[in-house]
Image (spheres, rainbow, N blue to C red):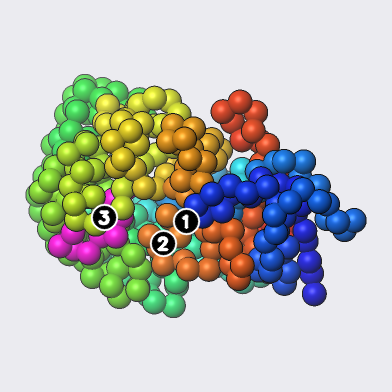
């Protein structure tokens, strides 16, 4: 039997904060008590926040580790372990690693190749070997505007435990990439295109989308059902996009690009997820709706770190300050993502829940991590 007591803490419970202590035993939360007393065997938290471990639904961070520079491939095992350690160090205890399925092979300068099946096998093997500090689940980012989506999806099955399939459509001229000048800055900066090469790229992608988008979208929706995964939409921009997402069974919307789309999500019962970097920076780097505007309009349910893992905790604290409700802010990165993906055993400080817990000191608006426990085992 293992037991850890965190005492004299500010506990962030589902609907309130409470000065008290928790007992973690054999991987679960066994007791919650109020008061400031510190038993001899306990860790004195000295008023620090004690929160549920953070739950990340969509992060590009692993891709950054496997390709730290353009066209530089890093050994996958080392990359996965470094990614895992980084997430543990910022309080994330459950992550859905976002892996792209759907590749483009025909354009030599802007091609992006297949990697998801191989990387998923390596994550699963490391998980089974007990080599990972936190909980890693699979999120397949189904790129509709691609050449190989159907064949890549076919390599996965229910045995892989895919938790999320998101519908990604990066066809130039719509959704996230509807602002062509910003798209040009992004693509030319990443690939070094000339103006002529950029125009050729746009034409090729739009032609590809016209040929395959409908078939690929249907295949991704069917794949999510086959895997038993939650379906997510991505970059919904119009009310028609949202209505289509609702018809397909989307449970949450990743990064809607307009307030109208976010409001339509609320009308259809689809949870709205926005990026923590958007919230912290004060706006979208792509010129889309600001996360803060949605928060102020009561249209924000879930936060994702997207491309900056350390942003997740600070964004939740920022929302707690904005709303005047710390528990509500923290729920956007704990309870809400757990509910959106059917993880009933985590996301809350409550008796019987997994003992995935973090200790945090506030330094102004930033949260400084002082301890991470996964199933009652300290990992950071």
Residue 261 appears in the picture as rendered: yes
Relative vertical location of residue 99 with respect to residue 65 in this rendering, above or below: below
On residue 110, which mark appears?
Answer: none
Residue displayed at 31% across by 48% down: 272
- Measured from the top left, where is residue 274 in percent x and y? 36, 41
Q: Secondary structure at mark 3?
A: loop
Quadrant that contains the N terminus = bottom right
Residue 117 appears in the picture as rendered: no
Is label 1 in contact with label 2 (beta carbons under 8 Å)?
Answer: yes
Residue beneath disc 3? 270
Closer to the N terminus: mark 3 or mark 1?
Answer: 3
Relative vertical location of residue 238 with respect to residue 26 in this rendering, above or below: above
Span of residues in magenta: 245-255
Q: Is residue 95 left or right of residue 248?
A: right
Q: CA distance from mark 3 to mark 2?
A: 12 Å
- Measured from the top left, where is residue 236 in percent x and y? 21, 45
Relative vertical location of residue 202 with respect to residue 125 in this rendering, above or below: above
> Outermost residue, right direction?
40
- Measured from the top left, where is residue 159 in percent x and y? 44, 77
Residue beneath disc 2? 339
Please state which of residues 9 and 120 is positioned toward the viewer in this rendering: 9
Q: Is residue 380 left or right of residue 305?
A: right
Residue displayed at 79% across by 69% down: 2
* In magenta segment, residue 164: no
Residue beneath disc 1? 335
């Amino acid at each position: 039997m293992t037991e850890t007591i965190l005492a004299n803490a500010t506990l962030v419970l589902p609907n309130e904060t409470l000065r008290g202590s928790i007992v973690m035993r054999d991987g679960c939360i066994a007791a919650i008590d109020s008061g400031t007393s510190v038993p001899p065997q306990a860790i004195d938290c000295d008023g620090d926040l004690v929160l549920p471990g953070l739950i990340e639904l969509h992060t590009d961070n692993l891709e950054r580790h496997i390709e730290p520079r353009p066209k530089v491939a890093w050994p996958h095992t080392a990359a996965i372990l470094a990614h895992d350690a980084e997430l543990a160090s910022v309080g994330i205890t459950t992550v859905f690693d976002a892996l792209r399925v759907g590749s483009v092979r025909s354009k030599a300068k802007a091609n992006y190749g297949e990697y998801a099946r191989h990387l998923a096998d390596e994550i699963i093997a490391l998980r089974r070997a007990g080599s990972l500090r936190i909980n890693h689940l699979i999120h397949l980012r189904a790129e509709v505007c691609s050449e190989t989506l159907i064949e890549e999806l076919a390599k996965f099955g229910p045995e892989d435990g895919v938790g999320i399939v998101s519908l990604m459509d990066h066809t130039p001229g719509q959704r996230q990439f509807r602002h062509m000048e910003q798209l040009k800055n992004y693509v030319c900066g990443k690939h070094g295109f000339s103006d002529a090469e950029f125009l050729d790229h746009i034409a090729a992608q739009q032609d590809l989308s016209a040929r395959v988008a409908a078939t690929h979208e249907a295949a991704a929706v069917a794949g999510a059902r086959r895997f038993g995964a939650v379906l997510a939409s991505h970059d919904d921009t119009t009310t028609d996009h949202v209505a289509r997402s609702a018809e397909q069974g989307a449970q949450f919307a990743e990064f809607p690009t307009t307030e109208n789309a976010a409001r339509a999500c609320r009308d259809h019962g689809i949870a709205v997820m926005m990026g923590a970097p958007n919230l912290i920076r004060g706006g979208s780097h792509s010129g889309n709706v600001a996360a803060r505007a949605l928060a102020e309009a009561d249209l924000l349910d879930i936060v994702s770190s997207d491309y900056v893992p350390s942003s997740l905790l600070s964004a939740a604290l920022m929302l707690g300050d904005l709303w005047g409700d710390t528990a509500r802010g923290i729920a956007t990165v704990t309870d809400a993502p757990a509910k959106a993906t059917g993880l009933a055993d985590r996301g809350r400080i409550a008796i019987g829940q997994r003992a995935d817990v973090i200790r945090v000191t506030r330094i102004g608006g930033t949260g400084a991590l002082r301890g991470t426990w996964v199933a009652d085992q300290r990992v950071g």
